[in-house]
Image (tube, rainbow, N blue to C red):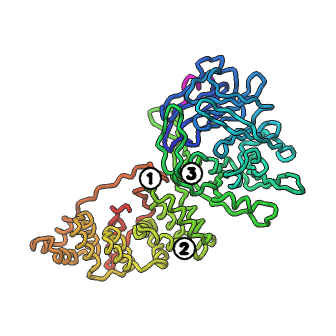
């Protein structure tokens, strides 16, 4: 996939001569792109921003890409048809596109249907003769070659090779670490996407005979992605991405040090993105000797078309279509915009619903440095709270307690809870605080930790629950703390809040008098004068639409903004203390 948010234009000359584009592929690290049209191919470097095409039109028109392409580090592997022969060709990004610069040519007995990289250096080639070939990519300082180490005939298993759209396989950990590559075929469990069915072939030995058991594990699948195939980025926490000979390198962070969800299997079924968090559990459940049903995948609904999963950022990336119409022209403009959505809350919820808080803690540890990690935790609480309020029968009774207990282990726990209250309707607050300490206790804890704006949020909850004393002692204490901290914006918000509680202004006057903020003549001002003092409008916040779900992670959107009635009937808006962004 390309780096999140990066865009590139097709090479104009190649697009003009060879349109339409029939195949496109990106490297796992997002540094390189290759496209193939009616004839030939072209490739692009995100780092340098340059395309490379054939200088000789005859060489470009001499072959057609048939069976797809894939990247191995800076080397492009393309399955081509040329003069009634079928080949695998290896091109270096660092060399020009011409016949003399080919790194290696591997002849194939028949046309390739699918080519894909799996693991660190394994290449799988599925052909029209219903044979799956296994090659090892051998690279040195000067050469890159392919060596065939095995093959698997699938006659009688796959009836129509042309209907296979994608293929990969899963090897046991012991075979990956210490096994002989020539024996990979004997241990591999093969995943095929045949039409819209995700098919699993598991190898087994019966009476000395190797056989494969087939099972359809998902239907209506448009594409799938096995995260362990992103080998160069997730196999070792200390491993850096491979560098091309020219030294081109893009800043890639997070995924190198992140092994969470390394064995996850993702697919899109036309309605939602689904994920099995551990493919080994899937293999065990799918084996013929096990009568258990397949584990249910995590479902992540999106309101856009998802195209890929960026594991290190915890997001699903996709495209949304927009139709723009202008009055000064007689046609409409159709555009695509990049959209994102967090998947982390859904995975955490799955772990907690399965009574596995340890797995949730490990996963949270991997993503805690994300700038929007706190917002992901808020979404987790909000999702479960909505189900609890709506009495969703699919929500386990213990889940809300498990989520609250899980969130309490984080240092910003108080902020997460108060932010959730700002994004939910007031009718949900009673349900939420049934699983939490009292708002008064959380208010005191926020004051003790000097989280003044967080304490302001709990002050609003106290007022809504009518637990705020008439004298508004808590508000005056918070006002005193804000004055000592020099937070005059919060002081202004608290002043407005006191005016909403007591329109006569007596409570505000008493508070100012006790704090010795104003002079005597200010204390004796009429309520209308005090209203003028507090009438300065707050600056309007502008949320930039560039984070997950289309907004800045640091400034989450407001889901609801109800107006709460004070005891004397005066409206006390939830917008009080809303300048706090967590």
Quick one: label 1, few (<14), some, or many (20+) residues within 10 Å?
Answer: some
User: Disc 2 or 1, which lies upstream in sequence?
Assistant: 2
The residue labelled by disc 2 is 402
Q: Quadrant of the C terminus?
A: bottom left
Foreground residue, 292 or 19? 292
Residue 342: image location, x then y, percent: 52, 56
Which span of residues is magenta-colored?
10-17
Foreground residue, 170 or 555? 170
User: Disc 2 or 3, which lies upstream in sequence?
Assistant: 3
Query: Do tag 2 and tag 3 residues touch (Cβ < 8 Å)?
Result: no
Residue drawn at (57%, 23%), measured in percent from left and top? 96
Mark seen at residue 8: none
Q: CA distance from mark 2 to mark 1?
A: 28 Å
Task: Residue 10: name its quadrant.
Answer: top right
Foreground residue, 289 or 452? 289
Query: Do tag 2 and tag 1 residues touch (Cβ < 8 Å)?
Result: no
Residue 13 falls inside the magenta stretch: yes
The residue labelled by disc 3 is 236
Residue 176: image location, x then y, percent: 68, 51
Task: Indicate which label's residue lies in the foreground, 3 or 1.
Answer: 3
Q: Is residue 389 above or below residue 212?
A: below
Q: Is residue 8 left or right of residue 411?
A: right
Q: Is residue 201 above or below residue 484?
A: above
- Local SS, label 3: loop
The residue labelled by disc 1 is 551
- Local SS, label 1: loop
Does residue 341 show up? no
Q: CA distance from mark 3 to mark 1?
A: 32 Å
């Amino acid at each position: 996939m390309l780096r999140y948010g990066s865009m590139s234009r097709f090479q104009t000359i190649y697009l003009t001569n060879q349109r339409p584009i029939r195949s496109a592929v990106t490297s796992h690290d997002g540094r390189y792109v290759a496209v193939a049209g009616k004839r030939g191919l072209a490739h692009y470097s995100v780092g340098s921003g340059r395309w490379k095409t054939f200088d000789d039109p005859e060489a470009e028109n001499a072959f057609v890409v048939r069976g797809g392409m894939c990247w191995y580090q800076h080397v492009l592997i393309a399955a081509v048809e040329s003069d009634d022969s079928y080949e695998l060709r290896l091109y270096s990004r660092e060399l020009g596109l011409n016949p003399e610069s080919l790194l290696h040519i591997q002849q194939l007995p028949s046309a390739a249907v699918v080519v894909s990289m799996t693991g660190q250096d394994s290449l799988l080639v599925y052909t029209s003769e219903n044979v799956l070939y296994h090659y090892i990519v051998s690279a040195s300082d000067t050469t890159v070659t392919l060596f065939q180490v095995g093959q698997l005939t699938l006659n009688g298993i796959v009836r129509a090779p042309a209907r296979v759209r994608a293929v990969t396989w899963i090897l046991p950990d012991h075979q990956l670490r210490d096994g002989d590559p020539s024996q990979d075929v004997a241990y591999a469990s093969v995943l095929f996407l045949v039409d819209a069915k995700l098919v699993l072939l598991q190898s087994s030995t019966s009476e000395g005979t190797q056989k494969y058991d087939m099972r359809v594990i998902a239907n209506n699948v448009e594409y799938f992605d096995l995260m362990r195939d992103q080998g160069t980025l997730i196999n070792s926490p200390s491993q850096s991405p491979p560098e091309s000979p020219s030294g081109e390198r893009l800043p890639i962070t997070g995924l190198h040090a992140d092994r969470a969800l390394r064995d996850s299997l993702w697919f899109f079924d036309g309605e939602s993105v689904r994920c099995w968090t551990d493919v080994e559990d899937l293999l065990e459940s799918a084996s013929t000797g096990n009568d258990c049903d397949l584990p249910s995948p995590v479902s992540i609904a999106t309101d856009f078309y998802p195209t890929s999963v960026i594991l290190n950022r915890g997001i699903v990336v996709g495209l949304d279509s927009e139709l723009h119409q202008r009055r000064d022209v007689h046609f409409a403009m159709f555009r695509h915009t990049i959209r994102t959505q967090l998947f982390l809350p859904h995975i955490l919820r799955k772990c907690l619903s399965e009574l596995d808080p340890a797995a949730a803690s490990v996963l949270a540890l991997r993503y805690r440095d994300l700038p929007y990690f706190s917002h992901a935790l808020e979404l987790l609480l909000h999702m479960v709270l909505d189900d609890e309020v709506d009495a969703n029968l699919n929500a386990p009774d213990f889940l809300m307690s498990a989520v609250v207990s899980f969130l309490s282990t984080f240092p910003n726990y108080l902020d997460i809870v108060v932010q959730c209250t700002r994004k939910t309707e007031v009718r949900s607050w009673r349900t939420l605080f049934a699983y939490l300490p009292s708002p008064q206790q959380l208010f005191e804890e926020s004051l003790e930790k000097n989280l003044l704006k967080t304490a302001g949020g709990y002050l609003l909850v106290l007022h809504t629950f009518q637990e705020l004393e008439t004298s508004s002692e808590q508000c005056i204490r918070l006002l005193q703390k804000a004055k000592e901290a020099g937070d005059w914006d919060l002081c202004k918000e608290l002043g407005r809040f006191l005016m909403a509680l007591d329109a006569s202004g007596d409570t505000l006057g008493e508070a100012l008098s006790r704090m010795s903020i104003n002079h005597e003549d200010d204390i004796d001002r009429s309520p209308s004068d005090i209203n003028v003092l507090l009438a300065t409008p707050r600056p309007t916040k502008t949320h930039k639409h560039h984070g997950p779900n289309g907004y800045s992670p640091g400034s989450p959107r407001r889901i609801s903004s109800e107006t709460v009635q004070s005891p004397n009937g005066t409206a006390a808006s939830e917008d009080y203390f809303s300048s706090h962004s967590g």
